[in-house]
Image (cartoon, helix red, strand yellow):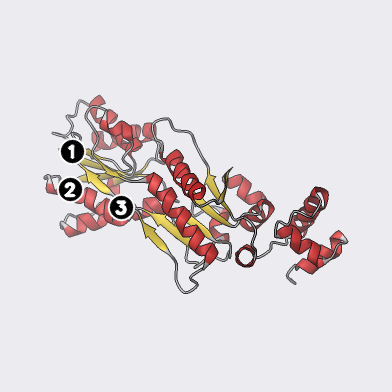
């Protein structure tokens, strides 16, 4: 099938190629009715301009869009808001326009990543919460829109990545449990289709291997980062295997669920079962027992993502993917002390 060009859009709209170009480059001398009509025609015929090239050649105001996928309000964690604040503060300090959007997997099926960005005239994108099964994930493998993923990696030099070194952090967390004498460590993981879950599970396995502890697939559950699901799963696991002496959880919320399950079964924490979380939510310091965790820096995620997407906009490095790791810290508290 022949690729749709700017010439095709101009012909169908009954305007010059220059007019279409000025619309996509954000020039103010185009009427709003013409602008909307051209964007609609472009969408209908499947035309998306090369936003990376357009941004490099244009002197117009740059706009960074932060897009959250499947955003769910969870009162016990402030991570999404901290990331948003980090991006916003960075853009304001640099005089860059900022836009925020929320999408769902269903919305991704209705409009491609290129179309979504084209219609909103953004220079670069920061994406949080994407799953490997989402339509945008596959489209990001070939996009030329400057994009930064948080807690995810795509092999495309136009798409950078910002995260904790999740493999190393998980390995350090599990190793701390092993050093405290734990030998039968369960992992309460998140979801199969989350890259961060894969990374943290890899770190869990590496820690066991380094300590010469045999891996056991039955000691891994997937609670979808949900506190109540983790509580129910942990109760079942503890009842079935009395030798489990620790849980490494891929999120603090799931760790809170595991603590509840252990307490409901009259298990002492940490004497009978130690619990280690991941994220460093503020609540973890104040629950009883206080929660051991891997402390992340979500505000710094936003700051680094803003810096990285501007690097990709201003001067893309086309021979390799740019990756930034934000420092973490394993904090030992009462739940594993």
Number of other residues with Cα within 10 Å of mark 2, as a class: few under 14, some 14 to 19, many 20 or more = some
Q: Nearer the viewer, mark 3 or mark 1?
A: 3
Q: Relative to residue 244, is residue 109 drawn left or right?
A: right
CA distance separating discs 2 and 1: 9 Å
CA distance separating discs 3 and 1: 22 Å
Number of other residues with Cα within 10 Å of mark 3, as a class: few under 14, some 14 to 19, many 20 or more = some
Residue where numbered disc 1 is placed: 336
Number of other residues with Cα within 10 Å of mark 1, as a class: few under 14, some 14 to 19, many 20 or more = many
Secondary structure under tag 3 reads loop
CA distance separating discs 2 and 3: 18 Å
Q: Residue at x 24, y 58 (%)?
A: 206
Residue where numbered disc 2 is placed: 176
The image shows a total of numbered marks equal to: 3
Lower sequence index among marks 2 and 3: 2
Lower sequence index among marks 2 and 1: 2
Location of the N terminus by quadrant is bottom right
Residue where numbered disc 3 is placed: 327
Q: Where residue 154 appears, x then y in whole percent?
A: 47, 62
Give whichever of 167, 322 is nearer the camera: 322
Q: Is residue 103 above or below residue 30?
A: above
User: Hey, which quadrant is residue 7 in on the image?
Assistant: bottom right
Secondary structure under tag 1 reads loop
Q: Is residue 21 above or below residue 29?
A: below
Q: Residue at x 60, y 66 (%)?
A: 56
Are discs 2 and 1 less than 8 Å apart at CB? yes
Q: Nearer the viewer, mark 2 or mark 3?
A: 3
Q: Where residue 145 appears, x then y in whole percent?
A: 58, 62
Lower sequence index among marks 3 and 1: 3
Q: Can you name the residue that lies furthest to the right here?
A: 14
Q: Can you name the residue that lies furthest to the bottom here?
A: 319
């Amino acid at each position: 099938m022949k690729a749709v060009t700017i010439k095709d859009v101009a012909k169908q709209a009954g305007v010059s190629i220059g007019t279409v170009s000025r619309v996509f480059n954000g020039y103010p001398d185009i009427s709003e009715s013409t602008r909307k009509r051209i964007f609609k025609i472009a969408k209908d015929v499947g035309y998306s301009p090369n936003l990376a090239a357009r941004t490099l050649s244009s002197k117009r105001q740059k706009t960074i869009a932060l897009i959250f996928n499947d955003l769910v309000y969870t009162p016990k964690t402030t991570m999404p808001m901290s990331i948003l604040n980090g991006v916003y503060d960075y853009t304001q300090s640099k005089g860059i326009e900022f836009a925020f959007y929320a999408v769902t997997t269903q919305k991704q099926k209705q409009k491609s990543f290129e179309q979504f960005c084209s219609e909103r005239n953004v220079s670069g994108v920061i994406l949080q919460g994407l799953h490997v099964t989402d339509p945008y994930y596959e489209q990001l493998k070939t996009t030329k829109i400057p994009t930064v993923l948080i807690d995810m990696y795509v092999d495309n030099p136009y798409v950078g990545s910002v995260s904790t070194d999740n493999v190393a952090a998980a390995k350090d967390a599990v190793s701390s449990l092993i050093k405290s004498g734990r030998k039968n460590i369960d992992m309460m993981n998140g979801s199969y289709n989350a890259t961060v879950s894969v990374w943290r599970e890899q770190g869990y396995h590496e820690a066991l291997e380094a300590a010469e502890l045999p891996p056991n697939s039955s000691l891994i559950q997937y609670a979808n980062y949900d506190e109540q699901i983790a509580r129910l799963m942990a109760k079942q696991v503890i009842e079935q295997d009395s030798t489990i002496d620790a849980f490494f959880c891929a999120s603090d919320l799931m760790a809170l669920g595991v603590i509840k399950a252990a307490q409901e079964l009259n298990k002492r924490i940490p004497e009978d079962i130690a619990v280690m979380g991941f994220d460093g939510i503020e609540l973890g310091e104040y629950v009883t027992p206080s929660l051991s965790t891997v402390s992340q820096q979500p505000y710094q995620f936003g700051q680094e993502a803003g810096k990285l997407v501007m690097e990709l906009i201003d001067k893309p490095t086309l021979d390799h993917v740019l990756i930034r790791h934000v420092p973490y810290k394993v904090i030992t508290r009462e739940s594993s002390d």
